[in-house]
Image: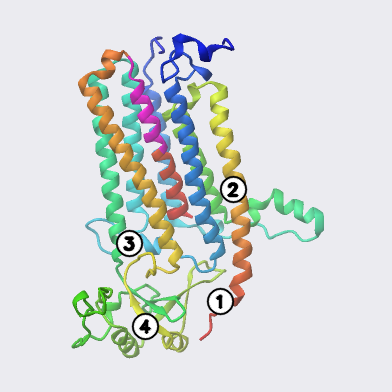
């Protein structure tokens, strides 16, 4: 390469012309370095999650007790749904790499159909993630928050967590949801939970087989500690309110940070999936229009594929650190 | 633009898909099974000054984390390798580009992880005695 190449009139195009440092085109190499920087961003988030997890290692929520839903099935099914999501994303990665492979052979028809399948896979994944969020935010069994913020869950004699509604005393409720119209200024209260704290406490008093599970993890068994009745009653005396589901301030699964990081990291990843789908759609339309056929190169498909595989790569790590470990 | 003819890699793509699926199935299987012998560290920390510290450093993965978690992280790295090398075609890039991307990320991520996890466990040890668990 000549030292004066920057002044060479043949390379004044924005993409570096025919110059290919490291034998990769300008666009592809920049995509690699973008991916590198994005990988460092994600690692920043995941290690911050790790810091909080190590900080609260004696109380951190157990993923199997949080993510245990499967569509059209009741009961406790940890892992299966997220494994399905992982398969969907890996499979859409496979169709993407098949599209790249077909592009190398200038096979427009195959590129079209594989790109289409990739987009469908991405949409399926995004829908699954929305469903996962819905369950996480809505919650299912409910819990009690104590005055100092700790979460108490209720378990039956077998040590299995049960719903607040299954034992709380029901009766006439005189609570009214605080609405904007009745408030000072324009404030409105949170939605009322299905049961009140008093009803839960009354129900607990009557069902003597019940006890509670606290956030603290038994270092020997690795499970959350289940208290005996006498201790449970003392804990419940310091309880503040009923909690359903998760948001950025409180969640029924335990430590608030857990929900914060879940929303932030899976949300940021989901945003990457969304932008990946949009990029794939743009490339797909261009494939249909024959842009790359005229250019005699499907390299744009390769660049979009790099990004799409990166999204899959990040999910592999999110899957491990949020669900497995 | 590259003009040389490309042979199809379809066979290799499906093989990699098979490997990734198999690893995911193994992960899910162990994630549900949680075998007892993998749930607590195999070794306890060495005592005794300098050599103890060296031993703890070298054998740290068997002392400070559950073998199951180490197993999961190892499988994840294997999956990442297959995705980057064969789906993103890193194996076909030049050595310079490969090292610029892979070595940079691995070095920085390992460094950041080490610092933050050490800090996190220190802060955890420092505050946990002050958390009230008796009422």
Whether residues under marks 3 and 1 lie with C-beta atoms below 8 angstroms apart, the answer is: no
Dot 1 and dot 2 within a common chain: yes
Residue assigned mark 4: A210
User: Whole-Å distance between the Cαs marked 3 and 2?
Assistant: 30 Å
Dot 3 and dot 2 within a common chain: no
User: Whole-Å distance between the Cαs marked 1 and 4?
Assistant: 25 Å
Is A121 left or right of A64, judged from the image as shown? Answer: left
User: Whole-Å distance between the Cαs marked 4 and 3?
Assistant: 25 Å
Q: Which residues are magenta?
A: A297-310
Whether residues under marks 2 and 4 lie with C-beta atoms below 8 angstroms apart, the answer is: no
Does residue B96 appear in this view?
Answer: yes
Could you tell me which residue is drawn at 30 percent across and 77 percent down? A164
Parent chain of label 1: B
Q: Residues within 10 Å of mark 3 (few under 14, many from 20)?
A: many
Residue A63: image quadrant is: bottom left
Under circle 4, the secondary element is loop
Could you tell me which residue is drawn at 42 percent across and 49 percent down? A319
What label does residue B70 carry, if any? none
Marks 1, 4: nearer the viewer: 1
Marks 4, 3: nearer the viewer: 3
Residue assigned mark 2: B112
Is residue A43 a member of the stretch shown in magenta? no
Identify whether B4 is placed above or below A171: above
Parent chain of label 3: A
Parent chain of label 4: A
Is residue A309 a member of the stretch shown in magenta? yes
What label does residue A136 carry, if any? 3
Does residue B14 appear in this view?
Answer: no
User: Whole-Å distance between the Cαs marked 1 and 2?
Assistant: 28 Å
What label does residue B131 carry, if any? 1
Could you tell me which residue is drawn at 57 percent across and 22 percent down? B95
């Amino acid at each position: 390469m000549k030292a004066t190449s920057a002044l060479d009139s043949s390379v004044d195009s924005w993409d570096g012309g025919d110059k290919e440092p490291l034998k990769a085109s300008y666009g592809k190499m920049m995509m690699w370095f973008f991916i590198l920087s994005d990988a460092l961003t994600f690692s920043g988030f995941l290690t911050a999650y790790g810091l909080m997890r190590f900080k609260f290692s004696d109380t951190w929520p157990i993923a199997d007790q949080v993510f245990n839903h499967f569509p059209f099935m009741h009961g406790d099914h940890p892992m299966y749904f997220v494994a399905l999501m992982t398969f969907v994303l890996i499979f859409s990665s496979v169709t993407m790499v098949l599209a790249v492979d077909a592009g190398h052979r200038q096979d427009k028809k195959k590129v079209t159909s594989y790109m289409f399948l990739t987009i469908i896979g991405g949409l399926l994944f995004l829908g699954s993630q929305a469903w996962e969020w819905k369950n996480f935010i809505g919650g299912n069994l409910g819990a009690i928050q104590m005055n100092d913020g700790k979460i108490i869950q209720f378990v039956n004699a077998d040590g299995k967590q049960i719903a607040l509604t299954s034992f709380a005393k029901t009766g006439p409720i005189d609570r009214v949801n605080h609405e904007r119209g009745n408030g000072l200024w324009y404030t409105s209260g949170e939605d009322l939970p299905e049961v009140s704290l008093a009803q839960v406490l009354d129900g607990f008093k009557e069902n003597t087989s019940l006890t509670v599970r606290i956030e603290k993890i038994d270092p020997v068994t690795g499970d959350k500690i289940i208290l005996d009745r006498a201790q449970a009653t003392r804990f419940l005396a310091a309880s503040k309110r009923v909690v359903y589901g998760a948001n950025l301030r409180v969640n029924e699964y335990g430590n608030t940070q857990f929900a914060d990081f879940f929303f932030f990291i899976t949300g940021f990843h989901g945003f990457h999936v969304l932008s990946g789908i949009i990029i794939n759609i743009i490339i797909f339309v261009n494939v249909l229009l024959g842009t790359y056929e005229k250019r005699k190169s499907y390299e744009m498909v390769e660049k979009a594929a790099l990004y799409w595989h990166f999204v899959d790569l990040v999910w592999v790590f999110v899957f491990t650190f949020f669900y497995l470990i | 633009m590259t003009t040389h003819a490309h042979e199809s890699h379809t066979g290799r793509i499906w093989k990699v898909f098979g490997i990734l699926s198999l690893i995911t199935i193994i992960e899910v299987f162990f994630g549900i099974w949680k075998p007892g012998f993998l749930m607590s560290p195999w070794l306890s920390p060495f005592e005794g000054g300098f050599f103890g510290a060296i031993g703890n450093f070298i054998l740290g993965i068997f002392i400070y984390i559950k073998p199951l978690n180490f197993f999961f992280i190892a499988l994840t790295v294997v999956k990442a390798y297959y995705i980057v090398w064969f789906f993103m075609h890193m194996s076909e890039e030049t050595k310079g580009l490969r090292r610029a991307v892979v070595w940079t990320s691995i070095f920085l991520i390992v460094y950041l992880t080490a610092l933050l996890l050490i800090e996190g466990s220190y802060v955890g040890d420092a505050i946990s005695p002050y958390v009230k668990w008796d009422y």
